Amino acid sequence: MKKTCFFALITLVFAGVFSFPSATGACSCTSPPGVEQEVARSKAVFTGTVLDVREATPFFGAPSTSVFFEVEETWKGVEQSQVMIVTGSGDGDCGSDFQTGTAYLVYAREPSLYGGSHEFESLICSRTNELAMAQEDLAVLGNGAAPTEQVDLTSSKNGQTILMGIIILLALGVSAALILLKRRNS
């Protein structure tokens, strides 16, 4: 009985460690660089309309938000008709507040704060802005190109949620198997 209680306690601790997000630090920005500098330090520059915004809490690291865009015009780093970027969840964590249905000019970088397998990251310290407020940037950028590859990213599932469910079910299954094994041996 002691071993069963001990294993159940270990399982609960293990599940608890992976269920709660870690704390993040606050973000402070200096004035954004000029358009040319921002393009040079960005991995991708594009205009697009937000299709979907999904909150994510990873096993390790800061909570983040995945933002799916329908790409209208691209200057750098994006060839697909849809792209997903990661950003913070707001409240001082450097994340941008993207609204579904709104068009933006996005300057995206290599992921550094939110990690994972994401290709692009956008932070409040960049020149990313609503398209209606980015006319000065667009004048400097000139004409971009249309995306060349048609894709549908919005139908994909959140892999971390599925993985978390599998881990919890596996832990419960192992616990149940050990309890049954203990009862048979008693």
Image (tube, grey):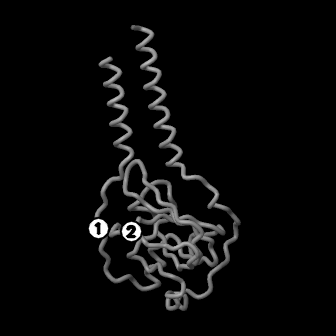
74 versus 114 height, above or below: below
73 versus 77 height, above or below: below
Label 1, secondary structure: give it.
loop
Label 2, secondary structure: give it.
loop
Furthest toward the top, the residue is 186
Q: In the rendered view of the protein, which quadrant contains the C terminus?
A: top left
Tag of residue 88: none
Q: Which amino acid, by three-letter code, is at mark 2? A: Gly
Within-10-Å neighbours for mark 2: few <14, some 14–19, many 20+? some
Residue drawn at the location 50% of the way across and 41% of the way down = 165
**Precedes in sequence: disc 2 or disc 1:** 1
- The residue that mark 2 highlights is 90
- The residue that mark 1 highlights is 26
85 versus 49 height, above or below: above
Q: CA distance from mark 2 to mark 1?
A: 10 Å
Residue drawn at the location 46% of the way across and 56% of the way down = 56
Residue drawn at the location 33% of the way across and 31% of the way down = 10
- x and y percent of residue 79 in the render? 64, 69
Quadrant hosting residue 71: bottom right
- x and y percent of residue 89 in the render? 41, 65
- x and y percent of residue 159 in the render? 54, 49
In the foreground, 74 or 15 = 15
- x and y percent of residue 139 in the render? 54, 91
Within-10-Å neighbours for mark 1: few <14, some 14–19, many 20+? few
Q: Which amino acid, by three-letter code, is at mark 1? A: Ala
Question: Quick check: marks 2 and 1 in contact, CB under 8 Å?
Answer: no
Residue drawn at the location 33% of the way across and 17% of the way down = 1
Mark in the foreground, 2 or 1: 2
Quadrant hosting residue 154: bottom right
Residue 32 falls left or right of residue 50: left
